[in-house]
Image (spheres, coloured by chain):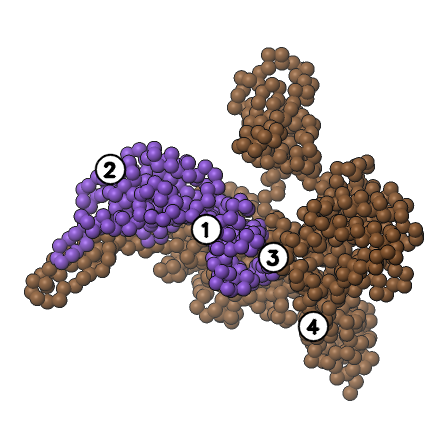
Chain colours: A brown, B purple
């Protein structure tokens, strides 16, 4: 029986409840469904709960596209298809998802059969550390349409599907990355000193190319000669890679395979890749070009040779072909000269700023050390104008002197030598390597700033305060798709505003008897040193054992060899974080009890050497998860900490998993035998959006599993009466405790901690 | 006591250990020895600290007593203890006492691993007093001029727990060791691993790449020692890539992705 349109709509609304999408949108999306495929409607709708929470528009797009897609797909493959779709949505947005849905054969089946080629994002995990190792610094890999580098990043093609075998596609990626790295090392994007720099905003090489009637042709030819040079360099530097690539290179497609008119560049490409050079004697220019390629492949060639080759060849070319039909080789990609130029300018600027800032601080420090010298007898107004002229950096540039231990570099300002510290010396060396000299304005501006430095310094300090700790980003577990939502939650560490109140005093007074008892109890748990008697080995002789043993021997009985005493140490190597729910539901006496419990546990922990910290958490929606450090692990239990406990108050919602993930990452830097995360909560995890119920519980459970996998032992103290239903599932049957009477929480908490850690 | 003399003699190094100086370290160490000052060697693992000590001991013709420190090393383990032998309590010197008596070089390897209270006993020995009190025997040993104390540690461990106290470290002449510069490292690997120059050069290059991976999650790159071990495997006929994987990549990390990247480096180079 065909499903009625109204019925379909009702079912859809049930699936996406409690949201109430616009009826008009729903009808339009469902229209394509009701047209047929009755038997498949159940399967199609079954995927809605997985897609709807990710994006409503994606869900509508899915409903519109799923009909045609099912002509290719088996219903059994639908859930896998949706899974891939959600991944695509997260990496490529709605547009990426639509492209994916548009062509099931190209994007899904070929991928399934392993014929879809290799995607760049899938090789980054392996190649990123690889290229960092090559470069000795972080060189981010970025997916782009063509391979390139701007000397800071390396761009590689999104997808490589030139070969059926993905191993070969991978090799091509690896070759691309290595090649682009090589071109930064060998200076393909750096203009040699012979190329005049005119316009400061344009790369000198770019200016050089535009001096020809067809700049793109000059650029292509230059890049080609550089490619030949690079392949020689790689064969020397990474022989293993080039040996493997030797089988691959001749199989790379060339534009020439399809082209009719074969240009010089085509001929050269074919020669370089397939070792199929043009026959000599047919064309004089071609012969000369081949000779030049051979020369650029010699070991001592540099990019000056490539430039000379371009200068020589281009005027001799007769045809007006601009070579746009000749695509660059895959690994070669494009020349991002302008990006590299901008990157260089940026680096110079940064270095200048760093140098001036460091030098300013250094001069100020120096003047503070020798205040008497700072008083110039002339004094007065012309001093500052003179400063600019008396400057000179006398880092000894004499090569002979440098070969012996280099002298400490120093700076002469106002006839006074200032020794540079290590940071400044290094920066100065970098600047001179780049620019050839040390620009005087760098020094004069530092001297100028140091003169009236106070206001300036204050400003920079204020800047530093704002950028304390950036937000951390965590994945979230979606149980419906059995996968992570990547980089889903943003966690910020926020300060608890200081509040003056008498909460602490009252609590200390109210529980004073208990606190005394607790302190005593906890003192007993302290690291103890004790003598263990009758050991086979030890630092001293156990005389009781010795006397017994001698007596035994005299009496003819077998004597013991356990004659030593050993000092044993029971070390408690524990680090614990209390993670406290600060959601709105804890307002009133619940929050009060939790805070009292915190004060008590802190008081009790003081005589103990266990390291402990306290964080609160709350927030609203995935982009504003907040954690509040109350006491960091190695912070003292100071009056400020007490004040922060007093200032803790109910805030927003309970999105628990991001906070747990944050604590796990905080724990990653903590070295301790036992790492304990104690969560205090009053109920289920819940947020303002769709983060509730099973979804929230499963996500929290997953966050706890991740914590366990990283050696953090989670434990929960809850006061929720309905806790038993879900707590065992989330934490495991023995890893939580339910405190039925909230007023007893302060007393129970230290007790619980004691049982947990002894 | 002939038994004891024999034991300390076993620590004498007779054959010249191979050591390629990278700077003034030999001259500084010799000067420190002449002046009766103790030596602190710091540097990453496998960069030649222990080999340097062996070489120094050979140059000075003094026995070398090495103690590898661990977190359960007690004072008695260093100084000595009473043992029961056939019903009698007999005092037995620990390695430190033995070295002081014999005027040997005592080398405490990885000193930060030892318990803090244990390291304190070397204090009077490490300053101008040069004394070792043996409480249990009521004895105060004064070190002869031939005695030298040397300790080593690896500052690369980013742990607050594994750091030397200022009161300890400020008694020493400190020598900082790093991996040798390229040419020297190639020479060392060549000779110790018995390799051809070209293979050694590539191994050192590989090590250089791994040492740049600090930000990618590899705390310490491949040490010279690892390279030599890989070289020895290669010398036994193991294929280069297999030897590198076993001796270098797998030894460096368990992380799958990093292992993958290291494998790519190996296959690029060889």
Distance (Cα) linking label 3 and label 1:
22 Å
Any part of residue A313 in sight:
yes
Quadrant of the image for the C terminus of chain A? Answer: bottom left
- Check disc 3 and report the residue beneath it: B269
The disc, 3 or 1, on the residue closer to the chain's N-terminal end is 1
**Chain letter of the residue beneath label 1 in the structure image:** B
Q: Which mark is residue B46?
A: 1
* Cβ atoms under marks 3 and 2 closer than 8 Å: no
Tell me how far mark 3 sits from mark 4, CA to CA: 29 Å
Q: Which residue is mark 4?
A: A114
The percent position of residue A558, horizontal first and vertical second, equals: 13, 67
Residue of label 2: B142
Spatial separation of the CA atoms under disc 2 and disc 4: 76 Å
Of circles 3 and 1, which is in front?
A: 3
Q: Quadrant of residue A164?
A: bottom right
Image x and y of residue A572, in percent: 36, 55
């Amino acid at each position: 029986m065909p499903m009625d349109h109204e019925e379909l709509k009702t079912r859809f609304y049930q699936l996406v409840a409690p949201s109430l999408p616009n009826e008009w949108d729903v009808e339009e999306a469902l229209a394509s469904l009701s047209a047929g495929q009755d038997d498949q409607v159940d399967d199609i709708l079954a995927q809605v709960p997985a897609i709807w929470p990710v994006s409503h528009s994606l869900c509508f797009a899915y409903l519109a596209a799923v009909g045609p897609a099912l002509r290719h797909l088996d219903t059994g493959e639908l859930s896998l298809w949706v899974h891939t779709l959600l991944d695509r949505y997260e990496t490529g947005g709605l547009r990426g998802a639509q492209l994916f849905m548009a062509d099931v054969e190209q994007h899904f089946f070929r991928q399934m059969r392993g014929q879809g080629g290799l995607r760049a994002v899938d090789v980054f995990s392996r190649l990123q550390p690889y290229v960092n190792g090559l470069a000795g610094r972080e060189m981010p890999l970025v997916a782009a349409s063509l391979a390139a580098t701007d000397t800071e990043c390396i761009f590689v093609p999104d997808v490589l599907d030139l070969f059926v075998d993905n191993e070969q596609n991978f090799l091509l990626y690896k070759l691309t990355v290595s090649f682009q790295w090589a071109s930064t090392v060998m200076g393909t994007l750096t203009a040699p000193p012979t190329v005049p720099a005119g316009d400061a905003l344009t790369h000198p090489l770019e200016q050089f190319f535009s001096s020809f009637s067809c700049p793109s042709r000059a650029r292509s030819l230059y890049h080609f000669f550089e490619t030949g040079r690079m392949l020689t360099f790689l064969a020397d530097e990474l022989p293993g890679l080039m040996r493997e690539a030797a089988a691959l290179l001749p199989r790379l497609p060339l534009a020439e395979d399809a082209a009719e008119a074969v240009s010089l560049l085509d001929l050269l490409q074919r020669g370089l890749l397939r070792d199929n050079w043009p026959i000599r004697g047919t064309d004089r220019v071609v012969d000369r070009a081949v000779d030049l390629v051979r020369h650029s492949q010699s070991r001592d060639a540099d990019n000056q040779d490539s430039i000379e080759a371009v200068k020589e060849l281009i005027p001799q070319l007769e045809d007006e072909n601009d070579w746009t039909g000749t695509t660059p080789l895959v690994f070669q990609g494009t020349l991002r000269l302008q990006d590299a130029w901008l990157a260089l300018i940026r680096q110079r600027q940064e270095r200048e700023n760093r140098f001036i800032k460091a030098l300013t601080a250094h001069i100020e420090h120096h003047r503070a050390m020798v205040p008497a010298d700072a008083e110039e007898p002339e004094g007065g107004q012309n001093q500052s104008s003179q400063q600019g002229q008396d400057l000179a950096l006398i880092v000894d540039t004499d090569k002979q002197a440098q070969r012996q231990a280099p002298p400490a570099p120093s700076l002469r300002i106002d006839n006074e030598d200032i020794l540079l510290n290590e940071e400044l010396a290094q920066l100065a060396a970098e600047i001179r390597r780049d620019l050839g000299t040390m620009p005087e304005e760098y020094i004069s501006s530092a001297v100028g700033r140091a003169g009236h430095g106070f206001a300036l310094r204050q400003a920079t300090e204020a800047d530093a305060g704002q950028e304390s700790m950036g937000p951390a980003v965590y994945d979230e577990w979606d149980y419906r798709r059995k996968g992570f939502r990547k980089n889903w939650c943003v966690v910020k560490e926020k300060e608890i505003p200081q509040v003056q109140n008498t909460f602490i005093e009252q609590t200390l007074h109210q529980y004073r008897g208990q606190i005394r008892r607790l302190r005593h109890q906890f003192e007993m748990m302290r690291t103890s040193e004790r003598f263990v008697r009758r050991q086979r080995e030890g630092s001293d002789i156990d005389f009781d054992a010795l006397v017994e043993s001698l007596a035994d021997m005299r009496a003819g009985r077998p004597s013991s060899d356990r004659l030593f005493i050993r000092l044993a140490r029971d070390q408690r190597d524990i680090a614990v974080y209390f993670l406290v729910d600060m959601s709105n539901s804890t307002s009133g006496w619940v929050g009060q009890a939790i805070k009292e419990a915190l004060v008590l546990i802190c008081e009790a922990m003081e005589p103990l050497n266990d390291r402990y910290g306290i964080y609160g958490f709350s927030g609203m929606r995935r982009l504003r998860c907040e954690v509040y450090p109350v006491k960091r692990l190695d912070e003292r239990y100071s009056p400020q900490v007490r004040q922060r406990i007093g200032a803790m108050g109910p805030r927003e919602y309970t999105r628990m998993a991001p906070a747990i993930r944050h604590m796990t990452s905080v724990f990653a830097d903590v070295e301790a035998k036992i790492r304990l995360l104690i969560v205090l909560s009053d109920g289920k995890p819940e947020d303002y959006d769709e983060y509730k119920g099973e979804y929230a519980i499963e996500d929290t459970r997953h966050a706890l599993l991740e914590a366990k996998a990283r050696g953090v032992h989670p434990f929960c103290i809850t006061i929720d009466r309905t806790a038993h239903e879900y707590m065992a599932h989330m934490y495991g049957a023995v890893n939580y405790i339910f405190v039925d009477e909230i007023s007893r929480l302060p007393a129970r908490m230290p007790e619980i901690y004691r049982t947990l850690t002894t | 006591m002939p038994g004891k003399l024999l034991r300390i003699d076993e620590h004498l190094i007779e054959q010249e250990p191979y050591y390629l100086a990278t700077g003034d370290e030999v001259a500084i160490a010799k000067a420190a020895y002449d002046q009766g000052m103790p030596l602190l060697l710091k540097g990453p693992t496998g960069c030649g600290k222990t080999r340097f000590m062996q070489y120094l001991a050979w140059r000075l013709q003094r026995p070398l007593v090495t103690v590898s420190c661990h977190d359960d090393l007690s004072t008695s383990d260093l100084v000595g203890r009473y043992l029961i032998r056939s019903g009698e309590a007999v005092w037995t010197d620990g390695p430190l006492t033995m070295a002081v008596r014999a005027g040997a070089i005592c080398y405490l390897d990885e000193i930060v691993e030892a318990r803090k209270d244990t390291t304190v006993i070397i204090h009077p020995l490490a300053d101008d007093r040069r004394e070792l009190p043996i409480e249990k025997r009521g004895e105060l040993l004064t070190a002869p001029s031939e005695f030298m104390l040397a300790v080593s540690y690896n500052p690369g461990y980013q742990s607050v727990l594994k750091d030397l106290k200022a009161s300890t470290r400020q008694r020493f002449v400190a020598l900082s060791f790093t991996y040798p510069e390229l040419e020297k490292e190639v020479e060392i690997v060549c000779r110790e691993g018995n390799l051809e120059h070209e293979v050694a050069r590539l191994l050192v290059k590989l090590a250089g790449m791994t040492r740049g991976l600090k930000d990618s999650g590899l705390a310490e790159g491949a040490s010279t020692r690892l390279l030599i071990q890989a070289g020895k495997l290669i010398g036994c006929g193991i294929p280069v890539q297999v030897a590198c994987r076993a001796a270098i990549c797998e030894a460096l990390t368990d992380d799958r992705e990093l292992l993958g990247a290291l494998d790519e480096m190996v296959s690029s180079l060889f």
